[in-house]
Image: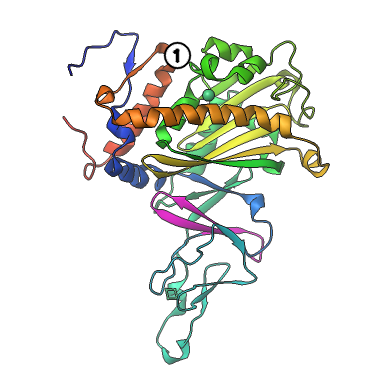
Amino acid sequence: MPTLPLPPSLVATLPGRYYTDPDLFRTEQERVFERMWFCAVRSSDLEKPGAFRTVQVGRESVLVTRSRTGALNAFLNVCRHRGARLCTEEQGQVRRTLRCPYHAWTYDLDGALIAAPDLARMPDFDRSAYGLVRVALREWLGYAWVCLADEPPSFEESVRAAAVERLGDSAAIDHYGTEGLALGKRITYDVRANWKLIVENFMECYHCATIHPELTDVLPEFAEGYAAQYYVGHGVEFGDEVQGFTVDGSAGFGTLPLVPPERDRRYYAVTVKPTVFVNLVPDHVILHRMFPLAEDRTVVECDWLYAPEVVASGADVSRSVELFHRVNVQDFEACERTQPAMASRAYRDGGVLVPTEHHIGIFHGWLREQLDADQPPFRRPA
Ligand code: FES
Ligand code: FE
């Protein structure tokens, strides 16, 4: 099939195999997810010492635990004896120690090896050299972010500043006090699509008029398709009749205490590369974390976060949750419809990006840079 040159107003997408090739996905795991800061766990999910959660980051299982001092720790979820997976559950609570289910090597909550059967018969064995392998961890927005790189990039520059800059006013994201909000609802979506289809979908609003009737009722500007959800730094105004960011436009829960009047009745959003979307509305924050598991499978955890008193009061958040839940379902169905077509010969050379989607081309350029940073194992065909 011949490739025709595109008119200058259009930009080519990535070729289809970027979404289907397991080798390419492996390279992304190594050069994107295992090198960058990755948003892993809501800190408040690990409330008490001994609470743990395991998450997939690139090719590694990472164990995040709350220590006895109250700090969060992250470790590779691998026993130092013969390499068994230490915690096999996705989440749980231990009393004081993490005990390997294979031969019972036992670690404290700071990762130190404290006991092993028959240790007395190995007087030369240096226990201190066989603690769990620690993973870098930072907390921001009430989440534990982890980084598997030997030398993690600056969190300030690569995560915080990048998000803050796109939202314009440097303190914008801080107005929402996300770290102090309480979880009102979490929905986990198992999406049969490549992670990039989900990012790209979130980066454009060309589709909003077609597939998001409820969202465009609340945010009429989105029906024009111009606003990119990639970052909505100017704040999209609610429609005139709309009282709150809810599925039927009915009132929400007022305004979070630090949100200034000029930000009331507006929606802001930002993508934090590689796998986080943050949506800011006057009375709550919606935060998506993606876990790319295979070239055609991505789990997305979406948290709806409210003022603690709203959640404590038992208020009905369902109309508020329903709006973005519908948006999520509509978006993920579109991604799942697209995924099988990525393997079609019709998409061998990719598709096109219209002018309102051009910033997706910047994302593709960034991704290619990461993949090409050093040469093998992934090589683009000539
Ligand atoms: Fe964990 Fe043996 S592999 S104790
Ligand atoms: Fe959408």
The range drawn in magenta is: 53-74
In the image, residue 198 lies at what x, y percent?
Answer: 46, 31
Which residue position is annotated with label 1? 356
Where disc 1 sits, the SS reads: helix
Residue 186 seen in this snapshot: yes
- Image coordinates of residue 381 in percent, x first then y, are 18, 32
Principal secondary structure, stretch drawn in magenta: strand
- Where is 372 relative to 227, above or below? below
Q: Position of residue 368 (x, y in %)?
A: 31, 32
Ligand 1 is in which quadrant of the figure? bottom left
Q: Is residue 236 magenta?
A: no
Residue 342 appears at what percent x and percent y?
32, 29
Q: Quadrant of the C terminus?
A: top left
**Amino acid, disc 1:** Thr
Label 1 near ligand 2 (CB < 8 Å)? no
Q: For this view, does 92 lie left or right of residue 190? A: right
- For residue 183, what is the image quadrant? top right
User: Which residue sits at x=21%, y=34%?
Assistant: 380
Q: How many residues crowd mark 1 within 10 Å: few (<14), some (14–19), many (20+)?
A: some
Quadrant location of the N terminus?
top left
Q: What colouring style does the render use?
A: rainbow
Q: Is residue 58 magenta?
A: yes
Given residues 204 and 166, the one toward you in this image is 204
From this view, report whether residue 124 is shown above or below residue 255.
below
In the current view of this chain or complex, which residue is farthest to the bottom?
121
Residue toward you, 370 or 101 = 101
